[in-house]
Image (spheres, grey):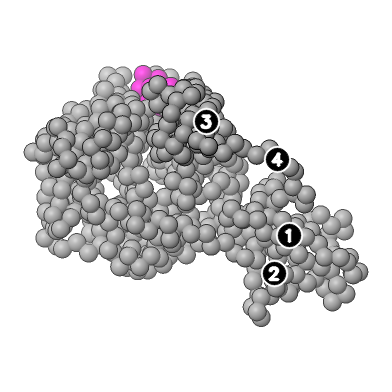
Amino acid sequence: MISTLLVANRGEIARRIFRTCAELGIRTVAVHSDADENALHARVADTAVRLTGNTPAETYLRGDLVVKAAVAAGADAVHPGYGFLSENADFARAVLDAGLLWIGPPPAAIEAMASKTRAKELMGIAPLGDVTEADLPVLVKAAAGGGGRGMRIVRRLDELGTALEGARAEAASAFGDGEVFVEPYIERGRHVEVQILADTHGTVWPLGTRDCSLQRRHQKVIEEAPAPGLPEGLVKELYALAVRAARSVAYVGAGTVEFLVADGRAHFLEMNTRLQVEHPVTEAVSGIDLVAEQLRVAEGHALPLDAPRARGHAIEARLYAEDPARDWAPQTGTLHRLAVPDSVRLDTGYTDGDEIGVHYDAMLAKVVAHAPTRTEALRKLAHALENTTLHGPTTNRDLLVRSLRHEEFTAARMDTGFYERHLTELTAPAPDPYAPLAAALADAHGRSRFGGWRNVPSQPQTKRYLMAGEEHEVHYRQTREGLTADGARVVHAGARLVVLEVDGVRRKFEVSTYGDQVHVNNTALTALPRFPDAKAQLAPGSLLAPMPGTVVRVAEGLAEGSAVEAGQPLLWLEAMKMQHQITAPVTGVLSELRVLVGQQVEPGSLLAVVQAPL
């Protein structure tokens, strides 16, 4: 029996495993980097062990340090979560060699399936060799790991070399393994997967399907179970292929077999030999705790012969600290407030006041809704996200709400190209026009020495805010009849709550202020000074860092004075385990190069200047 479990991971998955351990009476051990010293998962565990350093390569990818931590903390079992070392056979062996129980499949099964190239060979599929024009488009893909890292779509043959180099670097940083391969890229396919659970007594459960077609940068954004609209015959085929894959490697524990479905056919992608990020939707429809089942299987318990029947429909949305309108740029800073309605499940590794840093994935939380039908689950999740209080860096919350209500998604006609087709419309600004006024009234009340308004006539007051990239100036006046403001009657004006009557309809605005950052309901604003300071103009062609990160690569031979072409890659930033390419804005000459490889930069930092010819 397991008495103490170390989770070799961080964030929401560590907390989620700890939750099951608490229910089962199992003591928990967390590991944390220096950057995660005050992280939520380290605070809630019974014991926490420091891994010196900040980056994944220094900490969560150091299997030797994790095993040492487990032994030092008196753990008798290790759960890898997902990502990091979860599909590393050498780490699994090191855990077993230390006399600890490994919560996962046998190392040989990980070895056979964790490499996507070997998994395809096992299923009778060969990757592409020498790529020709006839093979395009193709997908460059990391052999290890997942989460969309180390993946590049190539549509032109002259882009293949750059894609291979970038994918290798990203995969090595995220998984400690730079092996990549090339396969055909299937346009407009659906990403469908089968959850499996297997014990040591020969039972393998196919625990239903999931659809994970809504993806950005090959990383899933919205997932649901069961996958809607699949013919019964295709579902049976998917089950059979998943069970075949599991039995071929004597699989034990929870795993996922992934497919692309196109033209009614299933194309095997890979087998993930671990728990998936989206496992909560399967838990919701099956009624079982997959982590609890993982632990029981590891202890040697047998599964019942028949898997539980699915009940209803579940949908999960991943909240990311990122700006979808700016090429999904990751965001950092303080998460001031995160509160989700009780009607849905929330899995998160953050709480109010936590810092979102640059070293790890940008996912803040997963929000999951379960209902009798897909239509009800969609409505429930969209409503919950819309009413979530989320104060801090820019997130994808509005994108999620619009995606869940998009006609193509509600009709279950989505595919993996959904965001390529619809991103512009889904990220079009739609701020509340009365949010600046509500912010100004709340600010004025908060600044009043007596906590209220003087009952004397006054001159119009003005205040300026930046909202959705545009400046807004609002006006209000105190009269003997009360407050009057731009296009609205002021019913109530407090420091935290403003009520306006617009066209005879009362509207409530909850206002929260953090320095010059103001959140009015779901609209974020920045208070601007009354008299803006004169600022030096940036030189034309200046390239600014779109996010905090580390310069990991500068184009070969690039130096001040180099001739460059518009769109040419100049340098690469790594932030939150993803690499981001910085390209020349115009054809001209690189007049300034302000950064070196290894240098950390903040958002807005000047990276380089490309001067166009006169």
Please say whether residue 336 is visible from this viewpoint.
Answer: yes
The stretch of residues the image draws in magenta is 57-65
Q: Position of residue 412 (x, y in %)?
A: 28, 64
Residue, x 81% and y 62% (percent of image)?
461
Give the CA separation, mark 1 to mark 4: 25 Å
Q: Amino acid at mark 2?
A: Val
Which residue matches tag 3? 608
63 in the magenta segment: yes
Q: Specify few, some or many for label 3: CA neighbours under 10 Å numbering under 14, 14-19, or 20 or more.
A: many
Which residue matches tag 1? 440
Q: Are marks 4 and 2 in contact (CB under 8 Å)?
A: no
Give the CA separation, mark 1 to mark 3: 38 Å
Q: Nearer the viewer, residue 275 or 573?
A: 573
Residue, x 63% and y 59% (percent of image)?
520
Q: Position of residue 373 (x, y in %)?
A: 32, 68
Q: Nearer the viewer, mark 1 or mark 3?
A: 3
| Secondary element type, mark 4 | loop
Q: Amino acid at mark 3?
A: Ala
Numbered circle sitting on residue 499: 2
| Secondary element type, mark 1 | helix
